[in-house]
Image (cartoon, grey):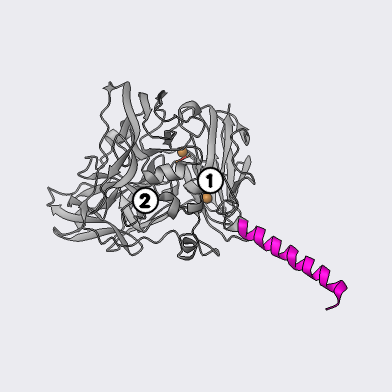
């Protein structure tokens, strides 16, 4: 090669190499980054599928556990410090602890008023609620009430951290109908880790309608909460979030319900009610019964559906909830049935109690939902895009000092929420969540929602290329978050702020 060609060629090769390096640095996050630590990065994990590369999105491989079956743990119903019909006062303490999930050493965990997960807060529509919040952790945390319609100063978003050994008191009035909600940490850039370690609990809102409805409501007998999660356990039975960290949703290979590995419940030949919460950081669950029987969905995120909807499967993305009822009188005593996710058994039903009389029929009507505006013009477009660290909400990453848009309190708006198909990184669906409100779905790609999605929602899964039109009306004031409920996406900035005034 001539000398005068050699230099430009070398420069060209050099430039290409630098570009490649930069590309891989960003792609594999070798660049220093606030949430990066060297042990977050392990090439081996990239290869064994914990990081979903090349667009082959899967939602985490769980498998049947080899541990011995254990009776499902039931989160305790939290005793109030003080209670009348009009008022209730609770104390919640976030703390570290040790939890024996399986044989061998206990796992270092976080929990509320206990070592892992939290108790059930029972509140009623119209009631004034006082909660005394205490943080006994060695780091700051927040207490976020997912699905509660409360003003933003008590909503527990990233703006309201409680420092280590600190406490706070909050007050609000329950201004919504009966629903199964939940609470969890929303600490800035730490939600994924703190929830993975155990900071999540349940809220049952009841009202006159739920009192009157003829539905199973004996806690632990025919009314069971199911907090779905999955975890990796290392040789010492530890979680080690940083080592199994997945920037598109940290999952695990071992399914847990309410912190129980391989759980079973003993049930009678009657209708049973399951209040299902997808409490996973990033895994979608697709539940069905092992014998293929159908069941009925009676509630979505924010309350009862208008009528029970017969379903063969229940798909829930992170943050979503649903209540279903299953007719156990169709099984024989001693029969074994499972709730499965694909081919993985996640909960065993053991038919141990004989039917007493005839199983009562389900109510035909559960709720009276206002109709939605199907013809209204769109007020706002919200775009989610990206994967890993390159995730954005409306093209931008979260900035606590920036209000992304302002909406008027008490005014209906129509939003179009879209997931932009990815260019380089492949596609994935994102569960879109809004704080402080319950909204309704008008359509998915122009098609009215399925009956089971017609009720109140606060989290919706939006697939790449899909546009979901929603009707939303904020009743409370303040600064609220909108974000992807894959907790690692939220931590990595797939979140925006809206001001309601
Ligand atoms: Cu369940 Cu902003 O969260
Ligand atoms: Cu929330
Ligand atoms: Cu996401």
Which residue is tagged 2? 239
**Horizontal arrangement in the rendering, residue 99 relative to residue 47 (left or right):** left
Q: N-terminal of the two: label 1 or label 2?
A: 1
* Labelled disc at residue 35: 1
Q: Is residue 269 above or below residue 57?
A: above
Q: Please tell me which residue is depicted at 40% across the width and 49% down the height of the picture.
A: 280
Our reading of the magenta stretch's main secondary structure is helix
Q: Please state the horizontal and vertical placement of residue 413, each as a whole percent of the image.
A: 58, 37
The residue closer to the viewer here, 385 or 293, is: 385
The residue closer to the viewer here, 416 or 32, is: 32
CB under 8 Å between callouts 1 and 2?
no
Q: Please state the horizontal and vertical placement of residue 314, each as a whole percent of the image.
A: 38, 54
Q: Please state the horizontal and vertical placement of residue 437, each as a whole percent of the image.
A: 48, 35
Give the position of the C terminus as an image quadrant. Answer: top right
The residue closer to the viewer here, 124 or 254, is: 254
Q: Please state the horizontal and vertical placement of residue 346, each as a whole percent of the image.
A: 30, 57
Per the rendered image, the range of residues in magenta is 1-25
Q: Quadrant of residue 184?
A: top left
**Horizontal arrangement in the rendering, residue 45 relative to residue 341 (left or right):** right
Q: Quadrant of residue 24?
A: bottom right
Residue 17 falls within the magenta-colored stretch: yes
């Amino acid at each position: 090669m001539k000398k005068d060609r050699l230099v430009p060629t070398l420069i060209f090769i050099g430039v290409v190499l630098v570009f490649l390096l930069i590309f891989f640095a960003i792609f594999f996050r070798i660049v220093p980054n606030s949430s990066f630590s060297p042990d977050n990065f392990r090439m081996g994990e990239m290869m064994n599928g914990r990081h979903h590369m090349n667009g082959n999105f899967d939602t985490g491989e769980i498998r049947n556990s080899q541990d011995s079956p254990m009776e499902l743990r039931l989160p305790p119903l939290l005793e109030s410090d003080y209670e009348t019909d009009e008022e209730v006062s609770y104390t919640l303490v976030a703390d570290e602890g040790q939890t024996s999930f399986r044989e061998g050493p206990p796992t270092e965990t976080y929990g509320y008023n206990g070592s892992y997960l939290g108790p059930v807060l029972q509140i009623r529509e119209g009631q004034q609620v006082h909660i005394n919040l205490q943080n006994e952790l060695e780091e700051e945390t927040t207490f976020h009430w997912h699905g509660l319609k409360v003003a933003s100063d008590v909503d527990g978003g990233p703006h309201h951290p409680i420092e280590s050994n600190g406490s706070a008191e909050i007050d609000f009035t329950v201004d919504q109908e009966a629903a199964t909600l939940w609470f969890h940490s929303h600490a800035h850039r730490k939600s994924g880790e703190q929830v993975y370690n155990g900071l999540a609990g349940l809220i049952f809102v009841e009202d006159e309608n739920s009192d009157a409805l003829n539905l199973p409501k004996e806690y632990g007998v025919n009314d069971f909460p199911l907090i779905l999660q999955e975890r990796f356990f290392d040789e010492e039975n530890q979680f080690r979030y940083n080592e199994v960290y997945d920037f598109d949703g940290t999952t695990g290979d071992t399914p847990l319900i309410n912190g129980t590995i391989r759980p079973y419940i003993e049930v009678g030949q009657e209708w049973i009610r399951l209040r299902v919460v997808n409490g996973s950081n990033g895994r979608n669950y697709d539940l069905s019964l092992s014998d293929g029987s159908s069941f009925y969905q009676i509630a979505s995120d924010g309350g009862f559906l208008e009528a029970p909807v017969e379903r063969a499967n229940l798909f829930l993305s992170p943050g979503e909830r649903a209540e279903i009822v299953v007719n156990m009188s169709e099984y024989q005593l001693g029969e074994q049935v499972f709730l499965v996710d694909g081919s993985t058994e996640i909960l065993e039903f053991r038919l141990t109690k004989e039917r007493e009389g005839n199983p009562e029929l389900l109510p035909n009507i559960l709720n009276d939902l206002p109709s939605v505006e199907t013809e209204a013009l769109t007020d706002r477009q919200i775009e989610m895009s990206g994967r890993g660290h390159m995730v954005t909400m409306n093209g931008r990453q979260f900035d606590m000092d920036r209000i992304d848009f302002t909406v008027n309190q008490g005014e209906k708006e129509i939003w179009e929420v879209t997931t932009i198909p990815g260019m380089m990184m492949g596609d994935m669906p994102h569960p879109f969540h809004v704080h402080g409100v319950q909204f309704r779905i008008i359509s998915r790609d122009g098609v009215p929602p399925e009956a089971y999605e017609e009720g109140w929602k606060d989290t919706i899964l939006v697939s790449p290329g899909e546009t979901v039109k929603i009707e939303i009306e904020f009743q409370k004031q303040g600064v609220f978050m909108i974000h992807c409920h894959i907790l690692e996406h939220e931590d990595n900035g797939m979140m925006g702020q809206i001001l309601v005034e």
